[in-house]
Image (spheres, rainbow, N blue to C red):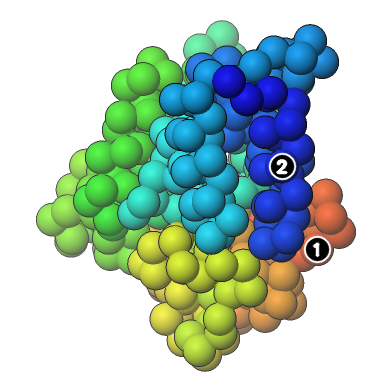
Amino acid sequence: MTDLRGAVRAATARLGAADVPSPAVDAVHLAAHVLGCGPGEVQRRMLLGVDLPAEQHQRYAELVTHRAARVPLQHLTGRAGFRRLELSVGPGTFVPRPETELSVELVLGELDALDAAATGASVAPRVVVDLGTGSGAIALAVADERPAARVLAVELSEPAARRARHNATTLDLDVTVIHADATGDPRTASDLAPLRDLVGGVDVVVSNPPYIPVGAVPRDPEVRDHDPELALYGGSADGLAIPLAVARTAAVLLRPGGLLVMEHADCQGQTLPAALRTGGWLEVHDHRDLAGRPRATTARRSGGTEGLAG
């Protein structure tokens, strides 16, 4: 038997020495995973001086070793919290970040504004499409918090698309997940055929596309070594080639005046909005996350699609 409090303290020290950003939090979450309880229960047992059985202590030590090697906490537990949801994540799937919750807020705000402005007793469900959904985080959060909306999600990676479908099923949320290239043209691309009937009629398109400039190396080992490259790199020196290709898809899908919400790197808070304005988008605004960093751009589709590029 090993004292749980001592094991968590030792794990915290080891993770801190490995420069893990939140060693105490991660040590508790790993213990919670091993014990099959919540972090609060771990802390309660620590206060009570509860022991950690030898088998569980060995498993805990193995997980701490992996985390000290900078394997993402979410890959070790298989879970990631995002807004009100707990998602299944793992190797091959981009781990959702707290800053991406800003994009959800912007989508929800637009849906609420549309509903507030609606007249008449019967209003068709609002349609939201998430281009490059990964684990399904944004799409599922929107479906969870605005269940009247019709939500569809597109993902190029087959493993990630499978995981997004799994999350939708597990959470009992009505999100249609399409395995397809989000940079394709829904009018002609066969893999985007499920979106064809929505061309020109979508209310909001949201995307957290790959946007890291080619040649740039992410600082965090968790990102650099474990997030799939397909979800990271934006296909050009400025990182905007793929985001702007996604914006072109969005322009085809959106109705006139429909809203694009797109996350970007904090170094793209001016370049992405400028490119969208040049491409014919209207009411282009950039938004900062809770840390005060440029994080997401919103833009409205004009009345026509020719030249809309972004």
**Precedes in sequence: disc 2 or disc 1:** 2
Q: Is residue 13 left or right of residue 190?
A: right
Residue 55 pos. (x, y %) = 44, 25
Q: Is residue 141 visible?
A: no
Query: Which kind of residue does numbered mark 1 sit on?
Result: Arg
Residue 90 relative to residue 48: left or right: left
Local crowd size for mark 1, using a 10 Å CA cut-off: few (<14), some (14–19), many (≥20): some
The residue tagged 1 is: 293
Instruction: Say which residue appears at 50% left-offset and 24% top-offset.
Output: 54
Looking at the picture, does residue 131 appear above or below residue 214? Answer: above
Q: Nearer the viewer, residue 164 or 31?
A: 31
Quadrant showing the N terminus: top right
Image point 22% across, 51% down: which residue?
158
- Up the image or down, 240 lies above or below 135; here it is below
User: Amino acid under label 2?
Assistant: Ala
Q: Which residue is mark 2?
A: 10
